[in-house]
Image: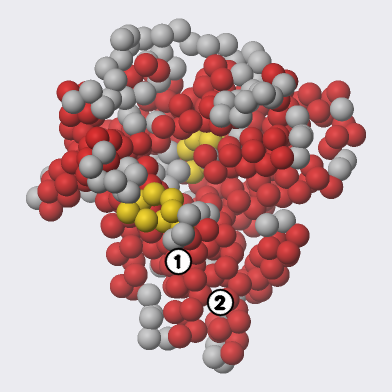
Amino acid sequence: MKKYFEFDKLGTSYRREIIGGLTTFLAMAYILAVNPLTLSLDAVPDLPEAMRMDKGAVFVATAVSAAIGSLFMGLIAKYPIGLAPGIGLSAFFAFSVVLGHRIPWETALTGVLFSGIIFIILSLTGLREMIINAIPAQLKLAVGAGIGLFITFLGFQNANIIVADPNTLVTLGSLSSGPTLLAIFGLVVTVIMMVRKINGAIFYGMILTTVLGMIVHLIEVPNKIVDKVPSMEPTFGAAFEAIFNNPASLMTSQFWVVVITFLFVDFFDTAGTLVAVANQAGLMKNDRLPRAGRALLSDSMATVTGAILGTSTTTSYIESSAGVAAGAKTGFSSIVIGVLFLLSLFFSPLLFVITPEVTAPALIIVGVLMVSTLSNIEWSKFEIAVPAFFTIITMPLTYSIATGIAIGFIFYPITMIVSGRRKEIHPIMYGLFIIFILYFIFIK
């Protein structure tokens, strides 16, 4: 096992990989609670039951698809990246597709399935890998930094340190509330351990925050540890219903807009995550992503698997950077993540102690680590600074990694051509320029 994952070459160990896997899992575990609530439209009253997905079935589909996807990533691509249904795509699935367009959730799952199959085809042909490797090094650095700002903003939001404001959009929240103080405690403790260079500081910070939360009654102590696994029957295989029972529903422009949106967002969210995490782990070689094809294939296969099980698009998680910060460097940590997701099927009561206040400090600290790539961007060259800055700033401002990438990639060819550096632009970047413009015109 150590030889397969090259522990000695990468300077890692079982202990570091296990702690890294645990850290990533804890940072991702919220999806096990959030995804069933989102896809069942639990927050929307007075809906026909036919529009709601079964929460128990979605919980199992979420855990199993996350486990399979993470195992794919670990064994095939050997990257320390966990996969699970993406919360942004889950929200799009539930609120835009099902609630907004009134597309049955079974048909929406078919859309996810189709997008995953297209992903697999693109991955096997090598086109996805070519696109990622065609992205210039400066924009890759910008993507990593932008994602760092995005997840830091997410962490502040989860802790209610930053809250919505009708006049200024966002503002400072109440720092005297119990949950926010708990998150601040976790942040301070984690920062101290990081400064002291304690391995696994992020993981230990989450544990200490959870324990304190229970002591002061901000986190409910679970009344049981093990619970039975719900049935997946209500959602399993539902993605095939429209294909066999109502193929006409797949011939509409509305359906294919849904497929293209799933395809677009997952493609570039995954690309951004892979580049950012690989950069952070020191796995990039000559500004290229080793085994990129395998990583992309793993992600594609996970999407298809998740659609068949009964959940929205399964994708690579940027929270994996928390595990990398805790020491993970190989796919063994992804195997740990996969095993933990399988175990979570039986220990679901314990997962609800991992609240947003517990994971918020981890996201904030990881954001600090990821924006370090800013120092390597050529800010003195305005043709580089503009697309890099737009990539970085629009990710948190639009709440979308894919949108940030799109805006930056639109400006890159423009500034490079005007500055006389046309020959440095890879032909694929021109294609992306056109695709992104069309995306904003017809889809976004």
Residue 44 is labelled as none
Q: Amino acid at mark 2?
A: Tyr
Q: Residue at x 70, y 34 (%)?
A: 98
Would residue 99 be found to the left or right of residue 3 on screen? Answer: right
Q: Quadrant of residue 380?
A: bottom left
Residue identifier under label 2: 412
Residue 228 in the image, given as x and y percentages of width and height: 45, 7
The image shows residue 278 at horizontal and vertical percentages of: 39, 54
Which quadrant is the C terminus positioned in? bottom right
In what element is the residue under mark 2?
A: helix
* Camera-side residue of 393 and 273: 393
Kindly report the distance in space between the C-alpha atoms of the residues bearing marks 2 and 1: 15 Å
Callout in the foreground (2, 1): 1
Q: Residue furthest left?
A: 196
Query: Local crowd at mark 1 within 10 Å, few (<14), some, or many (≥20)?
Result: some
Does any portion of residue 53 appear in the rendered image? yes
Residue under pointer 1: 393
Element type at mark 1: helix
